[in-house]
Image: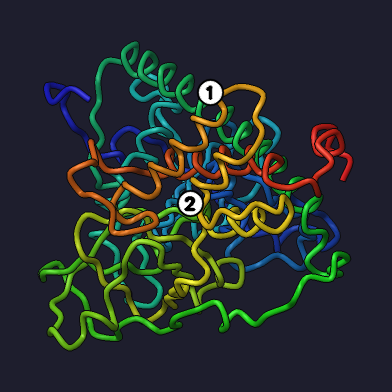
Amino acid sequence: MSSAWKKIAIGDVVDSVKTWNPLRSLRDDSFDYVDLSAIDQDSKTIIGVRKVVCGDAPSRARQLVVKGDVLVSTVRPNLNGVALVPEELDGATASTGFCVLRPRKDFLDGTYLFHWVKSPNFISDMVKKATGANYPAVSDRIISESQIPLPPLEEQRRIAEILDRAQSLISKRREAIGQLDILTKAIFLEMFGDPVTNPKEFTIRKIKDLLESASYGTSEKSSFEGKFPVLRMNNITRTGEIDLTDLKYMDLADSQKERYLVRSGDVLFNRTNSAELVGKTAIIRNISNPMAFAGYLVRLRVNKENDQFMLLEAIGSKYLGKDGQTLGTICKQISFPHSALKEALSKIYGFASDYPGIRHGGNPDSAIRDIDMREMVVMSILLAGFTPYLTNQINADVVYRGEL
């Protein structure tokens, strides 16, 4: 956004919100209640509205909201629990855990405000000003006093329209990835069966048999200074990615580095948090600088016998009877309808073997740039797509029709 636009306190361009006490109404009357858990933090929408009887109203059920209000959760600002009140919730009641922002229509466009409170600048500002180690929160006053760039109203609407279109594209991409995820699961079930019932009678092993180690992170206090970034619970997203926008740092003695530093291929998951976030998991991919991990996380380090690509190698050698020991060798022995397909799989294998930190140490000089989650998604999709060439146990027609 242009630095020429003046900044103004949000509180100066929003109106006050009316409150009420449901307990003073007829006991059997009911109302729509939006509490903090009603916000979907990924889509930034209200999805969990409850119908509450006035006689059983929570003490926080006080704020009357209207269409176009922007709700901003005052607790755990790093999670960015924000949403725009839709038309169907006009007149609903929101928890006092929200700061309700009602834009003055002559000065501030509501959609522009909504996009602003989702921005990294706003989130970072709130995280810095939050208080409380175990339950970080900000006050309504802090949110009202935070600054927002204020271009002319028409420019606000233009910006909001552009961001709406971008959000629509992102949503469609997520839907497409979701469909690909369904395909991957269908391939898995067709090939291996339901893991719970194990119809193909595969050997069952304990997770510990697949691991080199499983360990807690460091309990040492981190700060804004230090040599090593520290991955904490908030750095693991709900979609299995590592988010590096909010980091703290620490120093480690040489004797602590092996124990508390992560490397590519490590799996991290939350061992504590609210019920819906326990077990939130991500895989460390292609880290350019050493990073530590905090004590509320568990690090799983897979042993060498369980390399991810070895699964395909095992499938190819078992089901096709190929004598190759690597995916590259097995690829040469498979009958493809065109040489381009063989070359494509060979190049994927070559990429994973050569790029530093994916399968082997690799060749650091071969990397043109750092890889990110896009490459991880592409790799997963492509490898899943080639699986039918490595086994005769998949009914491709069944998978294609989604009849699993």
User: What is the residue that sits farthest to the bottom in this orientation?
Assistant: 255
Q: Which residue is mark 2?
A: 81
User: How far across and how far down the image is residue 369, in percent?
Assistant: 24, 38
| Residue located at (68% from left, 80% from top) | 205
Taking depth in this image into account, of 228 and 74 the one nearest to the observer is 228
Element type at mark 2 = loop
Quarter assignment of residue 50: bottom right
Q: Nearer the viewer, residue 204 or 159?
A: 204
Mark 2 or mark 1: whose residue is earlier in sequence: 2
> Looking at the image, which residue is at 11% across and 69% down?
227
Residue 288's x, y, as percent?
22, 54
Residue drawn 40% across and 73% down?
135
- Which mark, by number, is residue 15? none
- Total labels drawn: 2
Q: Residue at x 38, y 60 (%)?
A: 284
Tell me if residue 158 comes above or below residue 115 in the rendering.
Answer: above
In the displayed structure, does residue 93 sit left or right of residue 129? right
Residue 314, position as x, y percentages in the image:
62, 59
Mark 2 burial class by Cα count in 10 Å: few <14, some 14-19, many 20+: many
Depicted 402 relative to depicted 337: above or below: below
Q: Nearer the viewer, mark 2 or mark 1?
A: 1
- Quadrant in which residue 1 is drawn: top left
Up the image or down, 84 lies above or below 320; here it is above
Q: Residues within 10 Å of mark 1 (few under 14, many from 20)?
A: few
